[in-house]
């Protein structure tokens, strides 16, 4: 069996003909296997969905209980037979419940990474390398210039800014699933014990994380009357990135805008968004993590998707690994 007979791109997403299923389809399909609950990977409207318990829970929180006609839970490491194709889910270290999906038939194993990272993250299970013949890797930060700093050092800069500007509210823009909870967890680990205010868009998911035993400390709603302009001096407010610079922030005391994203490595992006304190914090693998992971899988062939494919394809070729870009459409990387 050739690898492309086991998995290949179709307009709906990555398709497995012998198992008759899609991985992270962007359009409604009969059977979907979903790597994680970010909106561009996990969409509502499939007939059946197979995913980890946490991914199914978060999809229900976001889309309502009828997000799919039927749902099946995959535990990490469990093998499931789908029409003679054996599939299994393995931790991806990206957000709570995130998984790589291994697909195996006739002695050929392909692993679709979904989104992943290798930096430790107290809010989800750590990435586990899976030996495979073909590794499908994301490449959001697939350029050598992208080397993420230690996450603790980035949140330490935020804690230092609070001490330096105690009269200002620090408004942190962070993606509502994963990034927001991770930055809160890092702040707690860094000794910041004061209540943290959260935007309403983060409330349900943060509560879910806490229910799964993830320590986020005391969270309070950031809802206040408009026009007050005095609230949260010296405090941290976490909100979706879209509200930075929005009138929503004007209710807080002299708001100082903070943005937590791997893209903050690019100063111009921070300037364009009017970010005063850019924090380089990503839930995606950086260049070193991408190349180390490719080696660890032992894959003889790599398919590269979601981002800067060319540089990583070139790196593989220089290192004797067959590689090609896999053009999947409909995935976004902006917020993460
Ligand atoms: Zn993601």
Image (tube, helix red, strand yellow):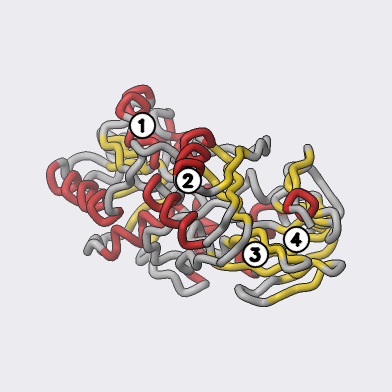
Pick the residue in front: 219 or 274.
274
Considering only order in the chain, which callout, 1 or 2, is on the residue closer to the N terminus?
2
Say which residue label 2 marks: 175
Residue found 42% across the figure and 45% down from its top = 174
Q: CA distance from mark 1 to mark 3?
A: 34 Å
Say which residue label 4 marks: 65
Residue 130 placement: quadrant: bottom right
Tell me the mark number nearer the camera, choosing from 1 and 3. 3
SS under mark 4: loop
Considering only order in the chain, which callout, 4 or 2, is on the residue closer to the N terminus?
4
Considering only order in the chain, which callout, 2 or 3, is on the residue closer to the N terminus?
3
Most extreme residue toward the front is 320
Say which residue label 3 marks: 57
Tell me the mark number nearer the camera, choosing from 2 and 1. 2
The reply, left or right, for residue 260 in relation to residue 101 is: left
Please rate how many residues cluster around mark 1, counting C-alpha atoms within 10 Å: few if below 14, some from 14 to 19, many from 20. Answer: some
Residue found 58% across the figure and 46% down from its top = 322
Q: CA distance from mark 2 to mark 4?
A: 23 Å
Tell me the mark number nearer the camera, choosing from 4 and 3. 3
Q: CA distance from mark 3 to mark 2?
A: 18 Å
SS under mark 2: loop
Considering only order in the chain, which callout, 4 or 1, is on the residue closer to the N terminus?
4
Say which residue label 1 marks: 250
Residue found 24% across the figure and 44% down from its top = 233
The reply, left or right, for residue 118 in relation to residue 258 is: right
Residue 17 seen by the camera = yes
Pick the residue in front: 147 or 155.
147
């Amino acid at each position: 069996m050739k690898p492309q007979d086991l998995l290949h791109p179709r307009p709906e997403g990555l398709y497995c003909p012998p198992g008759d299923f899609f991985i992270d389809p962007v359009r409604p399909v009969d059977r979907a296997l979903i790597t994680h609950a970010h909106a561009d990977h996990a969409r509502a409207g499939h007939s059946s969905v197979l995913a980890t318990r946490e991914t199914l829970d978060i999809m229900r929180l976001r889309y309502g209980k009828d997000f799919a006609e039927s749902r099946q839970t995959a535990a990490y490491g469990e093998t499931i037979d789908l029409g003679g194709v054996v599939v299994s889910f393995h931790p991806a270290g990206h957000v709570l419940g995130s998984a790589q999906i291994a697909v195996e038939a006739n002695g050929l194993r392909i692993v679709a990474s979904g989104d992943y990272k290798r930096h430790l993250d107290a809010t989800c299970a750590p990435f586990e390398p899976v030996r495979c013949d073909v590794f499908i890797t994301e490449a959001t930060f697939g350029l050598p210039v992208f080397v993420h700093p230690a996450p603790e050092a980035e949140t330490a800069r935020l804690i230092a800014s609070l001490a330096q500007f105690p009269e200002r509210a620090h408004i942190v823009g962070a993606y509502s699933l994963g990034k927001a909870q991770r930055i809160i967890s890092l702040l707690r680990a860094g000794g910041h014990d004061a209540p943290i205010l959260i935007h309403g868009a983060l409330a349900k998911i943060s509560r879910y994380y806490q229910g799964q035993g993830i320590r986020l400390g005391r969270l309070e709603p950031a809802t206040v009357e408009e026009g007050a302009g005095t609230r949260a001096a010296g405090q941290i407010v976490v909100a979706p990135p879209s509200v930075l610079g929005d009138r929503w922030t004007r209710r807080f005391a002299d708001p100082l805008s903070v943005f937590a994203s791997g893209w903050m490595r690019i100063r111009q992006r921070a300037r364009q968004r009017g970010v005063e304190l850019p924090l380089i914090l990503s839930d995606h693998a950086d260049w070193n993590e991408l190349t180390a992971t490719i080696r660890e899988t032992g894959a003889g062939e790599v398919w590269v998707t979601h981002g800067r494919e060319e540089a990583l394809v070139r790196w593989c070729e220089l290192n004797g690994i067959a590689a090609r870009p896999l053009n999947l459409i409909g995935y976004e990387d902006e917020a993460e």
